[in-house]
Amino acid sequence: MTPTDRPVPPLLQARGLRFARNDEPVFGPLDFSVDAGEALLVQGDNGAGKTTLLRVLAGLLRADAGEVDIDGERARAARRSRAIAYLGHLPGLKADLSALENLNFLCGLQGRRRGQLPESAMAIVGLSGYEDALARQLSAGQKKRLSLARLWLSPAPLWLLDEPYANLDLAGIELVNRMVQAHLRGGGAALVTTHGAYAAPPVRTRLLVLQRPSLEAAA
């Protein structure tokens, strides 16, 4: 087999991934993958571990068992930092910096998608005119849009989106869907936790349903 004949590995692959809190199982063991150009929709009841799973994949929590690969290589800390952009429940903004200063600061830390500028990202998410507004002065919906601008500027190919539709109106929901579509067309991938009938981007999607394991099953 020549190098060009080798199968392309998934952008993200998890094998036997498991997490417990205070010796109580939260999820797993899980086996799943997501390829470039597709999204993995993560569903489950409250407490099933959707947010915890994304935090484990992002490297914010340590799994109790299992392996995670990115592009066929073990997902060590440096690799995760380059490959993953995480959008959590909290906006992750510095309250006393302006909206534009926040984006410039984060681009300095994380790099920037080629051909994109913070000002253009703010226009994409509908925040033109708010460049000089302090982050603490923004509404919850505006903070979410600013976080989406940060996400759009990230050069990371893998997006981890924890309920990205929260605090957004219908126009904001459509914005998230367009962003995910564009990211996947460019060869990226996304993991999306959602609830609600509308809450799924119209893209090629796999489904992962989390069910909280019992203590007996984990024993």
Image: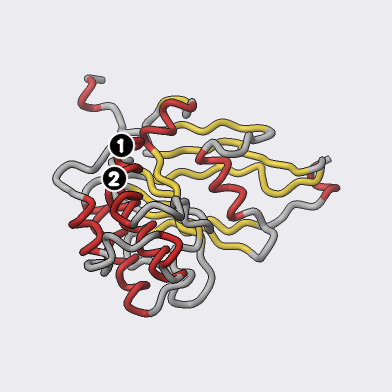
Image-based side of 213 in relation to 101, left or right:
right
The image's colouring method is secondary structure
Identify the image quadrant of residue 198.
bottom left
Residue ranking furthest to the left: 115
Residue at figure coordinates x 36%, y 44% from the top left: 35
Element under label 2? helix
Q: Position of residue 190 (x, y in %)?
A: 39, 51
Residue situated furthest bottom in the rendering: 170
**How many residues crowd around disc 2 within 10 Å: few (fewer than 14), some, or many (20 or more)?**
some
Residue type, label 1: Gly
- Between 4 and 200, which is closer to the camera in this rendering? 200
Vertical relation: 1 (above or below) 40: above
The residue identified by callout 2 is 104
Residue at horizontal 53 percent and vertical 56 percent from the top: 208
- In the drawing, does residue 9 fall left or right of residue 215? left
Residue 101, x across and y down, in percent: 31, 49
**SS label for mark 1:** helix
For label 1, the residue is 108
Residue at 54 percent across and 70 percent down: it is 195
> In the picture, residue 131 is in which quadrant?
bottom left
**Residue at the spot x=18%, y=48% of the render?**
116
Residue 39 image point, x, y percent? 38, 55
Tell me whether the residue at label 2 lies in contact with that at label 1, contact meaning CB atoms closer than 8 angstroms: yes
Q: Amino acid at mark 2?
A: Asn
Query: Residue 134: x and y, percent?
Result: 38, 60
